[in-house]
Amino acid sequence: MLSLRQAALALGLCSVLSQTWAIVLERPILEDFNTSLINSVAVLNCYLPSPPENETIQYELFKGTKSLGEYSAQHGEKGVFNLWVKDLSYDGNISCKASVQNNTDVKATESDTQSFRVIVPVEGAELRSNPSSGEVFEGRGLSLNCTLKQGTYVSYEWFLNGDSLNQSTELLVVQYVTLQDAGNYSCEARNEAYDPDEEMTMIYSTSSHRLVKVKAPVSKPNISFTVQREGDDYWAIVTCQSGRGTPPVTFSFHNQTLADLVSNETASLQATVRIPIILGQNMGEVQCKATNGGDLAVSDAMTLEVVPVGGVAKVRLEYEMGSYGKVLLHCDLERGTFPEIHWFLNGTELDSRGQFHKIQEQALKLTSITPSSTGFYHCEARDSFGTEKRIISEKKIIDRTVLDRVSVLAFAIVLSCLLFLMVLVTACCLYGAIHRRRLTPAKPRPIVLTEVVSMEDEDEEPEATEYMEDVELVEAAKIEDKDTSLTGEEGSVDEWPEIEKALQVNFMDEEPI
Ligand SMILES: *[C@@H]1O[C@H](CO)[C@@H](O)[C@H](O)[C@H]1NC(C)=O
Ligand SMILES: *[C@@H]1O[C@H](CO)[C@@H](O)[C@H](O)[C@H]1NC(C)=O
Ligand SMILES: *[C@@H]1O[C@H](CO)[C@@H](O)[C@H](O)[C@H]1NC(C)=O
Ligand SMILES: *[C@@H]1O[C@H](CO)[C@@H](O)[C@H](O)[C@H]1NC(C)=O
Ligand SMILES: *[C@@H]1O[C@H](CO)[C@@H](O)[C@H](O)[C@H]1NC(C)=O
Ligand SMILES: *[C@@H]1O[C@H](CO)[C@@H](O)[C@H](O)[C@H]1NC(C)=O
Ligand SMILES: *[C@@H]1O[C@H](CO)[C@@H](O)[C@H](O)[C@H]1NC(C)=O
Ligand SMILES: *[C@@H]1O[C@H](CO)[C@@H](O)[C@H](O)[C@H]1NC(C)=O
Ligand SMILES: *[C@@H]1O[C@H](CO)[C@@H](O)[C@H](O)[C@H]1NC(C)=O
Ligand SMILES: *[C@@H]1O[C@H](CO)[C@@H](O)[C@H](O)[C@H]1NC(C)=O
Ligand SMILES: *[C@@H]1O[C@H](CO)[C@@H](O)[C@H](O)[C@H]1NC(C)=O
């Protein structure tokens, strides 16, 4: 058939040429129309830019190979399709085909494909979080999913405490949560459809709010105890305290055999238990654990042993470096876990703070030495949980001469260091000068700087410049300088304890009582 027709064409092309044969269709144009709401009628137009006259043009709409509709257009009119978009099967690439009706001889042409979006309005936005409780520990991950009952071609917007976040996908993921990520989250889903008049319809669905709590994990707790006395019974009040962590925190206490002593949930970051104890007896180790839902934080183990004050008490002197005249008196005890120290001057108890002193924990600090602060000091130790027992120290005299001696000694050390340095420097200079003079006549030294020339002239202050120019000399001086500073420092550091010792010996000697 085909070859016959071709043969006929070849034979008498010009003479037999009819109008029908001359028709060559252009490519049709599918009008730009890209979205439609589901369950609505979409009106699509397809046309040939210059349709052939006196011919009926058959337009057909396709999605892939599936025909969506046909339209016969006469007198150059457009092909019009009223599509009842009833389901998502219309969603996808569509194209339009044009042919001359009842004339298969004219080759049909096809338009470019266009994507056609079927919009299912968003509905039922809901926020789901992982972890689902909405409680997440610092440093852990958080993901929020904006789920919908329905909706196609959806875009998302996320809000935290009402502020828009820079996130447009259905999923909001925070890899490592910080306290700043806590708050009131919501998401908004939306899609948009254009109708034939190119009017946009925007559809929204907003989720309810989801409160995300960020919890700080509980930190390693400190364990400590105090002693309480009730008649003849003694109790250890063991306190477990964490520095950080979001309450409520559950604390549990364990003794050596790791049996639970108490476990309680507290709104604060500490918990306390009372454990009966016997004075002077090792009651074993106690440990506590804290958790607020995450990992367990475990304290160090603490030995429950209360030793009452006992043995000998001694007053030890310590001088504060760099501030002459300031003295610390320590009350050194042989025994005692919970001592309470009292200080006395000439037998009168001192308040925690006075004109010339301050009591710092177990030490007494003398801030100035005046006639009213000199005299005999002693300390007394008692058990802070109230027993009758008292340990009284020897008396120690503090007077002007003691402190003067400290000051003079300290001053002497500094002075001797300075003197030593000066002697060394002078020695260096002299050595340099002599060495130089001795060498000069024998062999002229290389001249390093131009000033050396003028320096050779004895009249011009030789020492300062000479010192700089002579490479060998400068080096020698450097080495010696180093030595000086080293010995100087060491000397001053080393000598202090010696002086202290000496002084303590002195005090003891002078002690009249
Ligand atoms: C759909 O058509 C509208 C109006 O012509 C246009 O504004 C919009 O960008 C189009 N969208 C897509 C995805 O092509
Ligand atoms: C179309 O038909 C009309 C009348 O029927 C005629 O006058 C005209 O020439 C035709 N045009 C062509 C291109 O054949
Ligand atoms: C639709 O056509 C575009 C190009 O025009 C192509 O990139 C896309 O993959 C097509 N989609 C489908 C579902 O065939
Ligand atoms: C095309 O052919 C069909 C039958 O095949 C006929 O019913 C119809 O009238 C024809 N149309 C024209 C425009 O000739
Ligand atoms: C979000 O939730 C939907 C519905 O439960 C689920 O199908 C989807 O897989 C989830 N997305 C992610 C990224 O988990
Ligand atoms: C939003 O995120 C994009 C990339 O994720 C980034 O380029 C842009 O700067 C961000 N804008 C703001 C306001 O954070
Ligand atoms: C979250 O925010 C919404 C609106 O901004 C408010 O109505 C709601 O009470 C907030 N929820 C909490 C727990 O703060
Ligand atoms: C725990 O003890 C350490 C050292 O004793 C101290 O620095 C820290 O402040 C204590 N923390 C708490 C919460 O008591
Ligand atoms: C836990 O502590 C509360 C008060 O903080 C107290 O009333 C309760 O009895 C305690 N529970 C246990 C098991 O100790
Ligand atoms: C440890 O606890 C158990 C049970 O509470 C108790 O029987 C035991 O005496 C305790 N051990 C010590 C050393 O306190
Ligand atoms: C303490 O007693 C000594 C010796 O009796 C005396 O020299 C000193 O002034 C007294 N100090 C005070 C503050 O009374």
Image: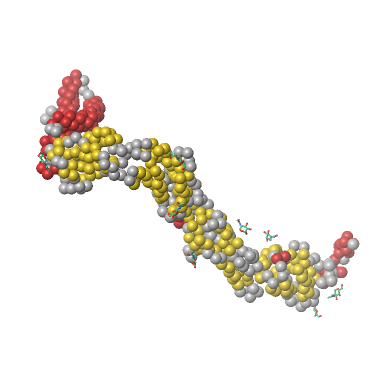
Where residue 280 sits in the image (x, y, percent)?
Answer: 34, 36
Q: Is residue 260 above or below residue 401?
A: below
Does any portion of residue 492 appear in the rendered image?
Answer: no
Where residue 19 sits in the image (x, y, percent)?
Answer: 82, 72
Q: Farthest residue to the front: give it.
A: 232
Q: Which residue is painted at 41% across and 37% down in the image?
A: 284
Q: Which residue is painted at 76% across and 78% down in the image?
A: 75
Q: Is residue 277 above or below residue 155?
A: above
Q: Is residue 403 above or below residue 240?
A: above
In this view, the residue in front, 374 or 129, is 374
Left or right side of 398 for 200: right
Q: Is residue 335 above or below residue 223?
A: above
In this view, the residue in front, 419 or 371, is 371
Q: Which residue is painted at 18% across and 42% down in the image?
A: 344
Q: Quadrant of the N terminus?
A: bottom right
In this view, the residue in front, 411 or 27, is 411
Q: Quadrant of the C terminus?
A: top left
Q: Which residue is painted at 68% across and 70% down in the image?
A: 38
